[in-house]
Image (cartoon, grey):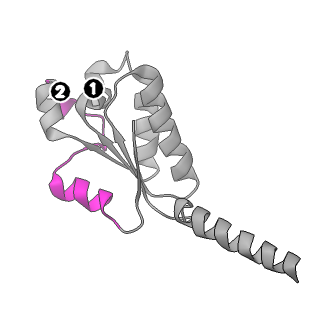
Amino acid sequence: MRYLVRILLSATLFLGVAGPGLAAATDPLFINMTTNEEHRSAMAIGFGKSQLDRGHPLTLFLNDKGVLLASKVNAAKYANQQKILSELVAKGAVVLVCPTCIKHYNVQESDLLPGLKVSNPDLTGGALFQDNTKALSW
C-alpha cells in the first residue's frame, strides 16, 4: 500500500509541475525575432517551421533587425531564410513585419516578400494574446 501511495504521489507531483510546461497539440506559437544574424535567424525560423509542421499555428513577428530578412533587396544575403519564410507563408503561417522597424532600417513596404504583412497593434496583439499561445524570442 505504501508503494502505491508513493507512486501516486510521484505521478501527481510530476503532472502538477510538468503539465503547465507542455503545449497542447494545437496551441499557437508566436515567435518574436529581433535578429538578422544568420545562425540565430535560421534557428528561429526553422524552429517555427518544425512546430507548424506539427500542427501548431505559427505567427512570426519580425522586428528590429529581423525586418531586414523580409526585404527582397537582401535576397542574396538571406536566401535560405527567405526561402523558408516563403514556405511558411505558403503553409499558412502568418509573418508580421514591424512598421516602425522597417522605417528605421529603410526597408520599403514594396520590397517585402510576398505574403508578409506590415503589422499593427491589432494584428500583433491578436496573435500574441490568443488563448493558449506560447511565445519565444530570438
Between 5 and 133, the one nearer to me in the picture: 5
Q: Dot 2: what SS?
A: loop
Count of labels in the image: 2
Residue under label 1, please give it: 68
CA gap, disc 1 to disc 2? 7 Å
Q: Amino acid at mark 2?
A: Val
Q: Is residue 51 above or below residue 43?
A: below
Q: Dot 1: what SS?
A: helix
Which of marks 2 and 1 precedes in the sequence? 1
- Tell me which segment is drawn in magenta: 106-130
Q: Which mark is residue 107?
A: 2
Q: Is residue 54 above or below residue 114?
A: below
Callout 1: 10 Å neighbours few (<14), some, many (20+)? Answer: many
Residue drawn at 44 percent across, 27 percent down:
40
Q: Is residue 129 magenta?
A: yes
User: Which quarter of the picture shows residue 15?
Assistant: bottom right
Question: Which quadrant of the figure contains the C terminus?
Answer: top left
State whether residue 80 appears in this view.
no
Question: Which quadrant of the figure contains the N terminus?
Answer: bottom right
Whole-percent x, y for residue 135 in the image:
40, 51
52 left or right of 134? right
Whole-percent x, y for residue 89 in the image:
40, 46
Whole-percent x, y for residue 113 in the image:
30, 34
Residue drawn at 23 percent across, 58 percent down:
125
State whether residue 100 appears in this view.
yes
Residue drawn at 48 percent across, 44 percent down:
48
